[in-house]
Amino acid sequence: MSTAQSEALDRFRHDYGAHRAAEGRGYSGDDLLGLPYVTRGRWARQWSVRARSFDAFVARVVVPLRRAAGRSLHVLDLGAGNGWLSYRLALAGDDCVAIDIRDDDVDGLGAAVALQRRAQFACVSASFDTLPVADGAADLAVFNAALHYATDLAATLREAVRAVRPGGEIAVLDSPFYARAADGMAMVAEKHAQAANRFGARADSLLALPFIEYLTAERLAAASTSLGLTWHRQRVRYPLWYEVRPLLARLRGQRRPSRFDLWTARVA
């Protein structure tokens, strides 16, 4: 990474934490311990979607992997934020490492301290592209609302494959997938057009890094061709308001919205 890129990343980390704080994204006490099952506050509706993704992830990926392995799992929680997913899995006995580039105490790894008092899991500040683990160290790597922050999708996936043992799995939770790339590109254009209103003085630093921003099935497959990954979309039943968004967008003449769902691939 060049000096300019490193400085841009440092500015992003600082300003993104400040932006998240301004949005009220920080949680503490029982609210933090209860994630992702948030029932009150500004972001409760958003968390109701993420809770459905997490429940599907546990039922369809974590539990079958535990059963097949005959033991608890070694899990890499990539883009872990405050570590809530690692906390949940650690409570069930899994050995988790929460990895994120942010270590602030808003909803970065610094906020995980309260969770680590209740369950044992590690927190490491690191990039997706240079995971500080040995080859094949994990049974499962999960991109936790995070894969769309990759700057080189193929390199990020290659590093995840390196870190997961043969027969293990990679999962993608809560990243925006579009049926058409044109709709994803339209979303990015809207984000940039609204940046001054949405981010204020932080707009330049928050938009400086070349994140991929969104995924499509084709984009994911193209980045995985040399890695032996075959991706499977596992549809999640989300709250009704989420499911009817495509219909409402069509009626209003708007671009098609993204979906999350659960995406999984087995490492060969």
Image (tube, grey):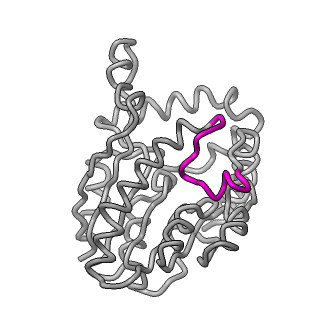
Q: Residue at x 32, y 71 (%)?
A: 169
- Residue drawn 53% across the image and 43% down it: 47
Residue 70 figure quarter: bottom left
**Nearer to us in this view, 61 or 1:** 61
The quadrant holding residue 71 is bottom left
Give x and y (percent) for residue 190: 52, 27
Residue nearest the viewer, comparing 154 with 253: 253
The majority secondary structure of the magenta stretch comes to loop
Q: Is residue 43 visible?
A: yes
Q: Is residue 191 left or right of residue 22?
A: left
Q: Is residue 147 left or right of residue 256?
A: right
Q: Quadrant of the N terminus?
A: bottom right
- Magenta stretch contains residue 144: no
Q: Can you say whether 210 is above or below 144 in the image? A: above
- Residue 188 vs residue 2: left or right? left
The image quadrant of residue 244 is: top left
Along the line of sight, the residue nearer the viewer: 243 or 119: 119
